[in-house]
Amino acid sequence: MTACPTGIAHTYMAAEKLVQAARSLGHEIKVETQGSIGAENHLSDNDVRDADAVIIAADKDVDRSRFVGKRVLAVGVAEGIRHPEQLLERARSAPVYGGEEGAGAGNGAGAGVGAAPAVGGSGGGKERSVTYKALMNGVSYMIPFVVVGGLLIAISLALGGHPQAGGGLVIPDGSFWKHVNDIGVIGFTLMVPVLSGYIAYAIGDRPALVPGMIGGWIANTGSLYDSKAGAGFIGAIVTGFLAGYLVQWIKKVKVPKFARPIMPIIVIPIVATTVLGLFFIYVIGRPISWVFTHLTDWLGGMTGSSAILLGALLGLMIAFDMGGPVNKTAFLFGAGLIATGNQTVMGMCAAAIPVMPLGQGLATLVRRRLYSEQERETGMAALFMGLFGISEGAIPFAAARPAQVIPANMLGGAVAGALAGTTGVTDAVPHGGPIVAVLGAVGGVPAFFLAVVAGSVVTAVTTVVLVDVVERRKGGVAARAAVGVEADVAPVVVGVGAGVGRGGGGGGVASRTGVGAVSVPAGHVGASVEEVDGAAADSAGVEVADRADGGDGSDGSDGSDGSSDGAGRDEGAGSEVLSGYLTGQTVKTQLVADEKEAAIREMAELVAGTGKVADVDELVRVALAREAQGTTGLGEEIAIPHAKTDAVTAPVVGFARSADGIDWGSPDGTRARLVFLISVPEAAAGDEHLRILALLSRKLMAADFRARLQGAEDEAAILRVLGEIQ
């Protein structure tokens, strides 16, 4: 099974490599590709039953319940591309998945031992850690709840809130906007259990989902353990991991064969939910309540101390867990003093409250290349929520990158709180953010906005610096994608059935021999190629498969006559390559540039000669931003930088060669000598972008095709070779 969490290129490359290797070894293999629209060339029950082994190459969890009782080898997608022959041989001796859990019964028990982390062989450390993948899984499912809940609350306050004499907004009970607000509150309430539930699901599969969600709800409901505030998203992360690993442990308990079918749907969820819930209430919850109480007492003793110190401390607390016990302690402390006539403490809190979402949103604008498309969209929503004092808008960022985001949030919150304390900002209502200043509840408005802006800038800059440091240590490969969150990964199964002759047809592959099922969920290779976000991803690649694999029917006839001048190439071979997107005008036999950024600019200027590029600088910026998310160097001396941007008015593809090669950060360490630049406008990105990537990634896996492309003497010869892609 192959799939990329954020795109398709590696999906097809891994599938093609596995098919080629299986053919050379005399095996029969069937490959299922899976992406944002689901599985293609789906592995049937018969395929799995008749398979001898399963290979899963992915950096994201996949549902392995259907492979119980089969030999399973789990690796990263890079291994599927670089060492397919070795994988096929190793799969034959891989451990039996689910064997220790008594999963030999193929029905209900199968679900019970589902998608736990690989029990089968591993890919030599090439897979992402279970912790990372589980956390990203939870964050990706949580983000919609944060965005929908936060924006509905903000919109209802903006359009339905009535200003009060003392400042602030109140939405009348029973009004239309009150109902909209209530819906938003429900979204916010659900985000914590959803985070916990899907972290647990990524570890323990379906049986862990209920304990994870209920555990998250308990963590967020402080009244269950005598606390005025729940544990928030940090508590949800704790319960998610506890639930997942608890379910995994229960699965290892030997049970009679007759009880196996009810284990995953009755026994495991009930036992895990009960144990986890009581454990949190009696063991974890009590300390949280104690911390809340003593923090409140401690803050009470500091009211007469330095305003700068108190403001900084309150800012640190507000920014730490965004809705958790530490945050709530500071907030309720400030709110409680309003009635006594002391409004300065709430002023410090009010200035710190919007800093986290505003700072994180600002960071996505300042250094867009460090963030995925989904993160940038979440950043825009966070900015909007920050204006209304909804600090939870920053939770997706904190949950995804806690080591970088939480310290940055706390530093910015401390700056905002300290500045507000120093300048004597006051707040007459228990709320924060620019909205309360606009509505007249804040005293010292200029100083208030100065504090908010300063804190937000500090948070944004610190976040960018910390994230950038981490990315550089990883060689420029982004930690996300994703959180992605968006595309589902699936396995590649070697099964009976489909014949070998159709190498990659339909996005899947079939072949047979000693190895039965090779499942390769292709996550991104250590450095991933564009991982597309359109729903048409895999379907586009499927069309390509039939033509790309073994389809060298075009022997150069397309455009073979365009050997002399550029015009002849444009109307001849050029017009036939990649639907006419690559022509004689967009081919260069030799790049002048010797490093990646310069090469991308040189190619952007090359394709600009077609008149389809409205803004070369913007095209370069978007292409480089894509590189920051994960290198587009595929290995095998190939790089396919690409950009979805309205800087181009129509799809256009450029190709150039580099004699010495360019360091592109490819997973196999090779320097890129064959470079394609794909540029499509936003409106066409969901279709053409994916189709072109799939066409190229499959065909370029053929060594003889690459050799002929390298050896082509001039543009006309290059176009004749590239014409084979059709």
Image (cartoon, rainbow, N blue to C red):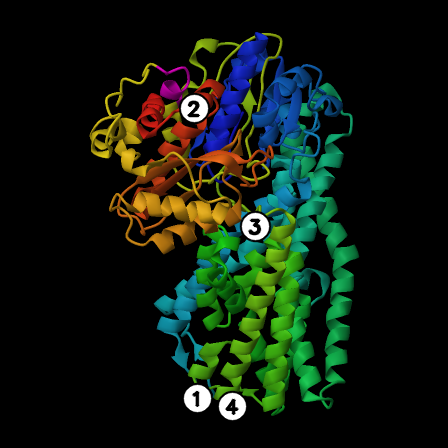
Quadrant in the rendering for residue 671: top right
Which numbered disc, 1 or 3, marks the residue closer to the eye? 3
The residue labelled by disc 1 is 165
Q: State the image coordinates of residue 450 (x, y, percent, origin top left).
A: 52, 82
- Which residue position holds label 2? 711
| Callout 2 touching callout 4 (CB < 8 Å) | no
The residue that disc 4 covers is 444
Residue at x 78% of width, y 25% of height: 254
* Labels 3, 2: front one: 2
Which three-letter amino acid code belongs to the residue tagged 3?
Val
Where is residue 178? Give x, y as percent.
41, 68
Residue 159 picture location, percent across and down: 35, 72
N-term-proximal mark, 2 vs 4: 4
With respect to residue 382, does 22 lie above or below? above
Instruction: Out of 511 and 16, give the one closest to the viewer.
Output: 16
Does 275 sit left or right of 479 as displayed?
Answer: right
Q: Residues within 10 Å of mark 2 (few under 14, many from 20)?
A: few
Q: Is residue 270 magenta?
A: no
Instruction: State the CA–CA distance, disc 3 to disc 4.
Output: 38 Å
Mark closer to the chain start, 1 or 4: 1
From the image, tell me which residue sits under label 3. 139
